[in-house]
Image: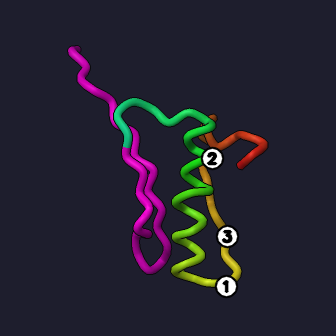
Amino acid sequence: IRRRKTWAILPAYTVNGYLPCTGIKEGYFNHKEFVDWIKQRLLPSLQATYRTRPMVIVLDNVSIHQNEAV
């Protein structure tokens, strides 16, 4: 098998559809990049869309999600 470039995609969606903060990168996201994406892209997008409404963020059990900062 000949492998090609690997791309990582960080989508965020709600019951109303995708949020405008999808992260796309060649290669993989590390813990720092993931936390930066949450702080700089996901949370501002959630705040702009839902203001102060309560919400729950669901993450699967991928190792990058298992970080004290998350």
Q: Residue furthest top?
A: 1
- The foreground one among 44 and 29 is 44
Give the quarter of the image for residue 46. bottom right
Q: Label 1 is placed on what type of residue?
A: Arg
Q: Which residues are magenta?
A: 1-24
The residue at which mark 3 appears reads as 56
Q: How many numbered markers are drawn?
A: 3
Q: Secondary structure at mark 2?
A: helix
Q: Residue at x 68, y 84 (%)?
A: 52
Q: Label 2 is placed on what type of residue?
A: Val
Q: Secondary structure at mark 3?
A: loop
- In terms of sequence position, does the residue under pointer 2 or pointer 3 come before the other? 2
In space, the residues marked 2 and 3 are separated at their CA atoms by 17 Å
Q: Position of residue 6 (x, y in %)?
A: 33, 30
The residue at which mark 1 appears reads as 53
Q: Label 3 is placed on what type of residue?
A: Val
- In terms of sequence position, does the residue under pointer 1 or pointer 2 come before the other? 2
Q: Residues within 10 Å of mark 2 (few under 14, many from 20)?
A: some
Q: Secondary structure at mark 1?
A: loop
Q: Residue at x 41, y 57 (%)?
A: 22
Q: Are marks 1 and 3 in contact (CB under 8 Å)?
A: no
Q: Which disc, if any, is residue 30?
A: none
Name the front one of labels 1 and 2: 2
Q: The N terminus lies in which quarter of the figure? A: top left
Give the quarter of the image for residue 5. top left
Q: Position of residue 70 (x, y in %)?
A: 71, 49
Left or right for 37, reference 6: right
State whether residue 49 is above or below residue 27.
below
In space, the residues marked 1 and 3 are separated at their CA atoms by 10 Å
State whether residue 50 is above or below residue 10.
below
Q: Residue at x 54, y 79 (%)?
A: 48
The residue at which mark 2 appears reads as 35
